[in-house]
């Protein structure tokens, strides 16, 4: 899903928190070298997709006061539950239920089955499939247009490489959550990719504890913990800003739970908070993984738009769409706010994703 979207380069993170576990499974065709990041600043996206409980709202960018969706689409007519959703680097949209994936190419005008360019049945050669189908908690495209499936059935991450067709099978699989591994006890919530296509997984123990895991190329091992209780996150790489940007910076943004300051030796830790936080890269694990700036709010989805020096969030409490300046300043207020259009049942802590599309 998303975007989604999706998902900027994380560098020089301390070895103590980025040591990769030796567990996991490897699929065919191991990757031997990472792709190159963008050489030029990323051009601004033309569309913002707001997914709220199976309905997609399509906004034309840049947003301005009074902006309204250009189009509102039901993502999987007749399904009854929100499908998994992802938006690729070329604007394609992938939707999945427990049994199949549908792919739609831009311009996106309808998600009726007749508009799909591909309908791919999920099989054991693609991902874990039980008697009731797959349990895809997320689906994401990486910057190289590979489609990744995050399946909590059996704890498996699988990769589909382009061009997708009705005979596609997983090019790679990674186990997640196996006993004895660093991911043991965690179930996947989201997957994300930075600008270099490094994989990050947000996972939870089911006890209000989430954690960020990382795996770089060749995707041969289970992701290891980065030690941050963080969800709804996005990475920003300085190369994505326009040359005129006054404050380009490598950033990690997300919903953070934890301390806001490192306690002095002998002092008790400060009470944990739940805030939207910003971390400057490279992270400084020896000084404590504490946000550099934060805002006292809880967001349900987040995506950054570096060329416009903006990022977009949906508020968990009411589903409204807020626009903040980038980089985030502590205590900042939204520069724009748009009310949730999905109705009260789908605006309060419901399934929400944000995607940028060309």
Image: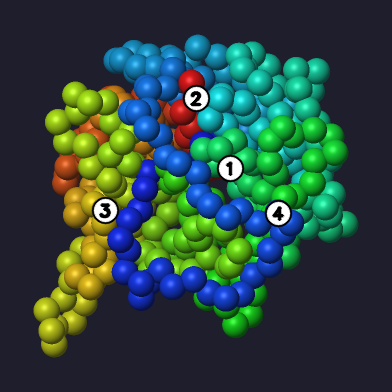
* Left or right relative to 269: residue 188: right
Label 2 and label 4: CA atoms lie apart by 30 Å
Q: Residues within 10 Å of mark 4 (few under 14, many from 20)?
A: few
Q: Residue 6: give its label.
A: none
Residue at the bottom extreme? 266
Residue 133 rendering spot, x and y as whole percentages: 82, 51
Which of pointers 3 and 1 lies earlier in the amino acid sequence? 1
Which of pointers 4 and 3 lies earlier in the amino acid sequence? 4
Label 4 and label 3: CA atoms lie apart by 32 Å
Label 1 and label 2: CA atoms lie apart by 13 Å
Query: Answer yes or no: do the residues labelled 4 and 3 have beta carbons within 8 Å?
Result: no
Whether residue 269 can be seen here = yes
- The residue that disc 4 covers is 29
Query: Answer yes or no: do the residues labelled 3 and 1 have beta carbons within 8 Å?
Result: no
Which of pointers 1 and 2 lies earlier in the amino acid sequence? 1
* Left or right relative to 89: residue 314: left
- The residue that disc 3 covers is 281
Label 1 and label 4: CA atoms lie apart by 20 Å
Q: Residue at horizontal 23%, vertical 47%?
A: 295
Q: Residues within 10 Å of mark 1 (few under 14, many from 20)?
A: many
Q: Residues within 10 Å of mark 2 (few under 14, many from 20)?
A: many
Label 4 SS: loop
Of the two numbered discs 1 and 4 in the rendering, the one whose residue sits closer to the viewer: 4
């Amino acid at each position: 899903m998303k975007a989604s979207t999706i998902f900027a380069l994380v560098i020089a993170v301390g070895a103590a928190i980025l040591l990769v576990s030796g567990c996991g499974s490897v699929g065919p065709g191991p990757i031997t070298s990472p792709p190159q990041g963008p050489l030029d600043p990323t051009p601004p996206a033309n569309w913002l997709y707001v997914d709220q409980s199976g309905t997609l709202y399509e906004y034309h960018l840049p947003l301005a006061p009074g902006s309204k969706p250009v189009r509102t689409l039901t993502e999987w007519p007749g399904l009854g539950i929100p499908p998994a959703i992802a938006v690729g680097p070329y604007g394609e949209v992938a939707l999945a239920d427990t049994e199949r994936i549908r792919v739609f190419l831009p311009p996106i005008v309808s998600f009726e089955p007749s508009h799909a360019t591909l309908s791919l049945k999920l099989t054991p050669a693609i991902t874990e499939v039980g008697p009731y189908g797959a349990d895809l908690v997320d689906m994401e495209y990486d910057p190289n247009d590979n489609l990744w499936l995050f399946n909590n059935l059996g704890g498996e991450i699988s990769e589909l490489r382009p061009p997708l067709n009705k005979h596609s099978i997983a090019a790679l699989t990674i186990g997640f959550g196996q006993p004895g591994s660093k991911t043991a006890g965690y179930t996947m919530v989201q997957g994300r990719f930075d600008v270099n296509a490094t994989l990050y997984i947000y996972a939870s123990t089911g006890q209000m504890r989430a954690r960020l895991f990382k795996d770089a190329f060749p995707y041969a091992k289970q992701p290891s913990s980065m030690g941050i209780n963080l969800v709804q996150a996005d990475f920003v790489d300085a190369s994505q800003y326009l040359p005129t940007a006054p404050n380009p910076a490598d950033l990690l943004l997300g919903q953070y739970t934890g301390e806001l300051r490192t306690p002095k030796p002998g002092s008790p830790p400060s009470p944990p908070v739940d805030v939207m936080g910003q971390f400057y890269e490279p992270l400084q694990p020896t000084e404590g993984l504490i946000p550099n700036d934060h805002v006292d709010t809880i967001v349900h989805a987040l995506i950054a738009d570096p060329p416009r020096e903006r990022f977009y969030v949906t508020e968990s409490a009411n589903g409204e769409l807020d626009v903040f300046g980038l980089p985030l300043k502590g205590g900042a207020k939204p520069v724009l706010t748009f009310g949730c259009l999905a109705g009260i049942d789908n605006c309060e802590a419901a399934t929400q994703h944000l995607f940028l599309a060309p």
